[in-house]
């Protein structure tokens, strides 16, 4: 195996771990946010009569209180995403930079030990991109607010419907749970989109800051999805914008970072052969 093969094998292993952990983390976050539903159950109990039902005349006041619940969902969701992005960014930055330095050496990679980019700076760049970059005019905070608002509306509809049917609190609580369960995919979709995006950004960022990584090649995981050829990552992987081969881009090309929601594509490095020869590797 070549030096480039060694590095890309490490990237394959990291990608598998990151994408697996994204699914696990998404499920954990859904469970954390689901705990808020217990607060709604308490609220339903407060508004119930002795017969366990809620008077339709109190619906307006009850649903007004759900505004606060929406805010709590949004805050907890945002904090959970923040924590997940920090975790994957710090871990991957440490692992990938460690692999690059061990294989290529500090001098060849960055020009000397005193020029190694600080981990904090790289992680901050990842955060800035994930949380502040606009996709179709929308930031991550807008996505989170949208999901929180949607959940609130679904919960409100379940409560209204159950109340007007004359159901008791237990039956309405079950409706609320069903509404949450059916909407949980929206939460998972955000997590399994943003964590892989952070991983891809980190690969590009370290590549951009090094002196030996010439380009990146998109690995679009063909065969995993029935309609993969319709995905943007497939289209990008079929392009040859620099004449260096299909799917090959420069580390500065940030437009390749967010092909589509829940994209599992990542990158391999293409090393600068002249720089490698100069470093006697």
Image: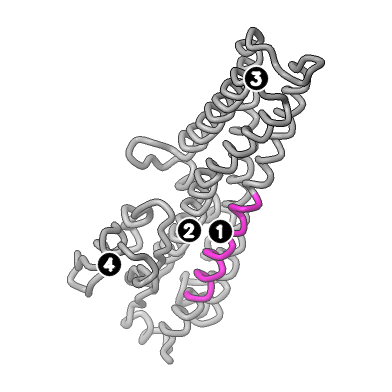
User: Residue 205, labelled with which disc?
Assistant: none
**Residue behind mark 2:** 196
Q: Nearer the viewer, mark 4 or mark 3?
A: 3
Disc 4 or 3, which lies upstream in sequence? 3
Cβ–Cβ below 8 Å for labels 2 and 1?
Answer: yes
Find residue 113 and report its horizontal and vertical position in percent.
56, 70
Which residue is at a point 24% across and 62% down the rendered structure image?
235
Q: Which residues are magenta?
A: 12-28
Q: Which residue is at the front of the view, 190 or 252?
A: 190
Horizontally, is 103 left or right of 171 in the view? Answer: left
Asked whether residue 13 is drawn in magenta, I would say: yes
**Residue behind mark 3:** 166
Horizontally, is 4 left or right of 141 in the view? Answer: left
**Residue behind mark 1:** 22
User: Residue 237, labelled with which disc?
Assistant: 4
**Total of numbered circles in the picture?**
4
Horizontally, is 156 left or right of 228 in the view? Answer: right
Q: CA distance from mark 2 to mark 3?
A: 46 Å
Q: Which residue is at the front of the view, 109 or 266?
A: 266
């Amino acid at each position: 195996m070549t030096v480039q093969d060694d590095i890309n094998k490490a990237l394959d292993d990291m990608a598998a771990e990151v994408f697996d952990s994204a699914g696990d983390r998404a499920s954990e976050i859904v469970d954390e946010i689901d705990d808020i539903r217990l607060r709604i159950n308490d609220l339903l109990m407060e508004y119930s009569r002795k017969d366990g039902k809620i008077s339709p005349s109190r619906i307006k006041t009850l649903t007004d209180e759900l505004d606060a619940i929406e805010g709590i969902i949004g805050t907890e969701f945002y904090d959970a995403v923040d924590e997940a992005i920090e975790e994957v960014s710090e871990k991957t930055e440490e692992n990938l930079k460690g692999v690059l330095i061990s294989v290529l050496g500090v001098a060849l990679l960055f020009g000397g030990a005193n020029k190694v980019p600080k981990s904090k700076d790289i992680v901050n760049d990842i955060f800035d991109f994930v949380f502040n970059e606009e996709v179709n005019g929308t930031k991550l905070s807008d996505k989170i607010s949208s999901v929180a608002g949607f959940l609130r509306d679904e919960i409100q509809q379940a409560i209204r419907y159950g109340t007007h049917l004359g159901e008791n609190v237990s039956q309405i609580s079950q409706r609320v749970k069903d509404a949450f369960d059916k909407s949980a995919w929206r939460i998972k979709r955000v997590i399994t989109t943003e964590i892989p995006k952070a991983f891809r950004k980190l690969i590009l960022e370290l590549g951009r800051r090094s002196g030996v990584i010439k380009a990146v090649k998109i690995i679009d995981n063909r065969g995993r999805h029935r309609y993969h050829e319709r995905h943007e990552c497939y289209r990008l992987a079929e392009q040859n914008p620099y004449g260096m081969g299909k799917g090959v881009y420069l580390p500065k090309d940030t437009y390749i970072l967010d092909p589509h929601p829940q994209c599992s594509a990542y990158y391999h490095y293409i090393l600068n052969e002249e720089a490698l020869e100069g470093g006697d590797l």
